[in-house]
Amino acid sequence: PPAPPGRAGPGPGPGPGEEGGGTARDRVKLAEAWKYVDRVRVYFASEPHKYSLFLRCVLDLFETTAHLAPGGAEEEATQAAAAAAVAQNVHTVALLLRGSPELFARFRRFFPEPCRVYQRSGVANGVDGANREASLVNQEYNNQQVQHSGAT
């Protein structure tokens, strides 16, 4: 499975034990985040396509959460689109981690605001949303299989 972002090449910041700015508290949070991502990597050791999808969702959450800030200069439509994207990403992570409530609980601790957006969105309780996301996971797996077979 691929290594967490930032450990092999460019990424969101230094990995554990690497030099970086910020307060001691920030470094502790970053170290906790890396440990969490590593636990998720181990959880998906036999399903690397799911780990890749998890990472993609997390990175997308970092990008789209910025558009949720109340009172920002963003238009209402942009905020609504960002909220929908956040809800979909959290829902995908919820489906991916459904076999490990402990990992999803830790995810919620790292992303409290996106998880609140997800709960308010209605996607959390929608059967159609669950079916759509399960289909997304399967489609992502199939896409990766096609890319992998084409690369050999």
Image: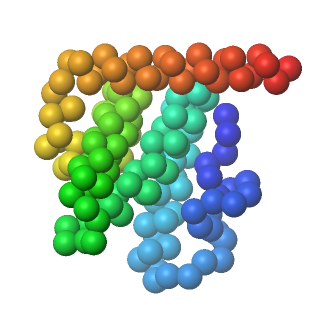
Q: In the shown orientation, is residue 149 left or right of residue 98?
A: right
Residue at image point 57% right, 20% down: 141
Residue at image point 59% right, 16% down: 142
Task: Residue 10 in the image: state x and y as whole percent.
Answer: 69, 60
Question: Can you see residue 51?
Answer: yes
Q: Residue furthest right?
A: 152
Count the marks.
Answer: 0
Relative to 2, residue 49 above or below: above
Q: Tell me the quadrant of the picture where the C terminus can be found.
A: top right
Task: Residue 144 in the image: state x and y as whole percent.
Answer: 64, 23
Front-most of residues 90 and 44:
90
Tell me which corner region of the image, top left, top right, bottom left or bottom right, holds residue 100: top left
Question: Can you see residue 104?
Answer: no
Tell me which corner region of the image, top left, top right, bottom left or bottom right, holds residue 127: top left
Task: Residue 92 in the image: state x and y as whole percent.
Answer: 37, 32
Front-most of residues 30 and 132:
132
Front-most of residues 32 and 148:
148
Residue at image point 56% right, 82% down: 21
Q: In the shown orientation, is residue 117 left or right of residue 16?
A: left
